[in-house]
Amino acid sequence: MRLLILFLLILQISWAVPQFAREYQTSCFTCHTNIPMLNETGESFLRNGFRFSPDDVASLKEFITHGNRQYEPLGAMAGFNYSDKNSNSELSGKVKLYFAGTFNKYISLFAMSRQNINTNNPNAPKLFQEDSSIAYVNFAFNEPEHLLRAGLMAPFTQLGNIQRSFADSALHGLPSGTKGKDMYKSPLQRTGIGNYKGAEYSYLYNEKLLLLISYGDAVDHGGGSNAHKGGQGSGNIGKNPQGSYGAGNNLGGNQKGKGKIKLLMMQNGGFGAQNGMSGMNGNSSAGHGGSNGDDSQLLAGLRYFFDSGWKVGLLYGYKEQKGGDIDSVIIPIEKDFGKWYVTSVIVYSDSDKEGDYKGIENAVLYKLKENSFIRGILNYGLDDNDNDETGCSLTYSIILNDFAMLHITGAYANSIEDIDDTQLKISFNLFF
């Protein structure tokens, strides 16, 4: 009955289309090789502040002043997931809300927040919390060369499909029911680079060389080794002298603080919940928390566009946290072969807590038809004790009339501690 009610609810909104496609009266495939992978048009659209040209309509200004407009700068995604690894129920729902558009030729805004439905997991993402949201302002000066972003952001957005290639892989959280070092982590997760509050500047030279640097306070999960006793919770974002509520398991251990709950955007508080690395594989983890203000994150590097179509980057990441600092070198490689799209990310990280680590993530996407594709992911990692870990998944996806998407994914992971597990996951999403 629960499944039937949810399915009927979904049918009621099946007429809707995604926000940007609705705005420009074009197909989603204008910007996406296959959703969510961006092609060159999509990367340019993103970099220009959600515009195809500087002369596009300033949608947010019209929205605020109630001027004439053909659409609202609002969007949403609703859907449900089936997984044989859900702890309380095999069926859960999810909602994402979007607000995005341009103010004028130079300034644009993007905001997104999400929430899981029908889950007893206290660490599941909730609307308008830092860990489950993105909200930033774009300043595009002398576009497309100079771009400044500020706010609550995901780290790899301007660097191609590093995140998008590996999203929704069903790998993370495996092996099921384990904690701490037993849990599988992808090579990109080992770098510790995740969402942050701060600023990012990027420069595109001659449409070939992209230079980028970002810095800010890391948006971390609560609990684990970063939890604090007494009047301070388990999150890691900005100190809260009044304390906060902390109940999380950050890949190991549960701890609780005492005090008051602080909402997103309040001056002295914050949350620490889920999805610390945003579109990067939907990472599981921790509970609400206050912050200690000591965590920071730096990401800097370059990406070069070769005439042959290859896109290669060299990035340096630094994460300062109480559990130990992490230095990382990341080399992303991408190539669009038409029906095939290949992404590889080579990772080296040096963690005070976990030592040296070397790994590679590979994603291969094959387009079956214009609206359907298969994606395979294969990860391999090796720590400084020569213990290895592997993760692989296979996904079939189909897009229906630019407003609905079905994913069927099977995944297998074997952790550093030589514990393995599998997962079957089915997701159906609607965009409107």
Image (cartoon, rainbow, N blue to C red):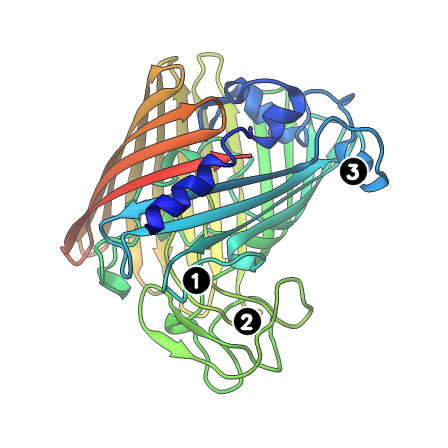
- Name the quadrant of the C terminus: top right
Q: Secondary structure at mark 1?
A: loop
Q: Amino acid at mark 2?
A: Ser
Badge 2 density bin: few <14, some 14–19, many ≥20, Cα 10 Å: many
Q: Nearer the viewer, mark 2 or mark 1?
A: 2
- The correct choice, above or below, for 201 with respect to 340 in the image is below
Q: For mark 3, what is the residue?
A: 63
Q: Earlier in the sequence, mark 2 or mark 3?
A: 3
The x, y position of residue 193, in whole percent, is 46, 51
Q: Viewed as shown, does residue 254 lie left or right of 390?
A: right
Q: Could you tell me if the residues under marks 2 and 1 are in contact, i.e. CB atoms within 8 Å?
A: no
Can residue 398 be seen here? The reply is yes
Q: Amino acid at mark 3?
A: Phe
Q: Amino acid at mark 1?
A: Asp
In three-dimensional space, the C-alpha distance between marks 2 and 1, rounded to whole angstroms, equals: 17 Å
The x, y position of residue 249, in whole percent, is 36, 68
The x, y position of residue 256, in whole percent, is 42, 79
Q: Secondary structure at mark 2?
A: loop
The residue at 66%/30% (across/down) is 50
Q: For mark 2, what is the residue?
A: 291
Residue closer to the observer: 361 or 409: 409
In three-dimensional space, the C-alpha distance between marks 2 and 3, rounded to whole angstroms, equals: 35 Å
Q: For mark 1, what is the residue?
A: 325
Can residue 365 be seen here? The reply is no
Q: Secondary structure at mark 3?
A: helix
